[in-house]
Amino acid sequence: MRIRFTKMQGAGNDFVVLDETQGRFGLSAAQYRWLADRHFGVGADQILTVRPAPAAGVDFEYVIHNADGAEVEQCGNGARCFARFVRDQGLTAKDSLRVQTLGGVIEPRLTPDGRVTVDMGAPIFELPRIPFDGAGLTPRPQGPWQTWPLDLGVAAVAVAVVSMGNPHAVQLVTDVETAPVHAQGPLIESHARFPRRVNAGFLQVLDRAHVKLRVWERGAGETLACGTGACAAVVAGIRLGQLDARVDVQTRGGVLTIEWAGEGRPVFMTGPATTVFQGEVDVPVLK
């Protein structure tokens, strides 16, 4: 089956974007994995699919598959690329959109400077909704909030847990460049306390308005940037008393600006969204 695709990136987090507004391709999990494969397919951290609005009050459906072929709830950098794609492809004339994801409705907005701001919705802290199993654990007070102890077998870490429509475990580190992202990331991702697995963030606070961040993404490994990870890290930093309401997040792929006014309020993420190239590819039959 031959399909058209667009390769995009947001702060180095790269995507294959598919237009299914005129009909679905019916891709299997194995075919999504093939598309994401950097040796045999196109290569991407996630596959993003544009579908028609599933209900009144939204403009499109936004479907996300990780590089391992699994469908996931949310992708922040992808949301910016999604908004740029539908506008550039003439699928909408709007600058502001309402988009349905598996994790809820988000609202991306194209800005005059070419970047995209996304209303990512309010963060979720209730443990069953993240989901995180805290049974038998004692949280550790830190600032006005708390962290949770996590036994990794080879080490014990303290993580702040939050959902941005997808689950995140954020730990504070003194130096993000030397943080054990590849050693601890897979262990945190698949830890039994997170029944749907989790994205593992490693956050270095530079000052109250600037941080560095690396994220081991669920189903993708370390990526150059993670939009929901940046949102979750800043929310955690604010609740732990480390950060102010507007923070520039330096990732390995670029800078994202995150704003959060406090509990019950939405998180706003602003950053780039760039088209790299377009093409066609013959997708093999895979089960």
Image (cartoon, rainbow, N blue to C red):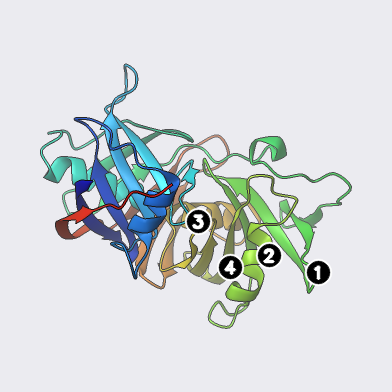
Q: Mark 4 points at which residue?
A: 202
Q: Name the residue under label 3.
A: 229
* Residue at horizontal 31 percent and vertical 56 percent from the top: 15
Asked whether the viewer can see residue 110, the reply is no
Residues under labels 1 and 3: Cα distance? 24 Å
Nearer-the-camera pick, 35 or 101 = 35
Disc 1 + disc 3, Cβ < 8 Å: no
Disc 1 + disc 2, Cβ < 8 Å: yes
Disc 4 + disc 3, Cβ < 8 Å: no
Q: Establish if 244 lies above or below 82.
A: below
Disc 3 + disc 2, Cβ < 8 Å: no
Amino acid, disc 3: Gly
Amino acid, disc 2: Leu
Q: Mark 1 points at which residue?
A: 153
Q: Identify the disc placed on residue 187.
A: 2
Q: How crowded is mark 4: few (under 14 residues within 10 Å), some or many (20 or more)?
A: many
SS at badge 2: helix
Mark closest to the chain's N terminus, 4 or 2: 2
Q: Residues within 10 Å of mark 2 (few under 14, many from 20)?
A: some
128 displayed left or right of 231: right
Amino acid, disc 1: Gly
| Quadrant assignment, res 224 | bottom left
Pair 1/3: label in front: 1
Residue 267 image offset from top left, x and y in percent:
45, 44
Q: Residues within 10 Å of mark 3 (few under 14, many from 20)?
A: many
Q: Establish if 250 lies above or below 177.
A: above
Disc 4 + disc 2, Cβ < 8 Å: no
Mark closest to the chain's N terminus, 1 or 4: 1
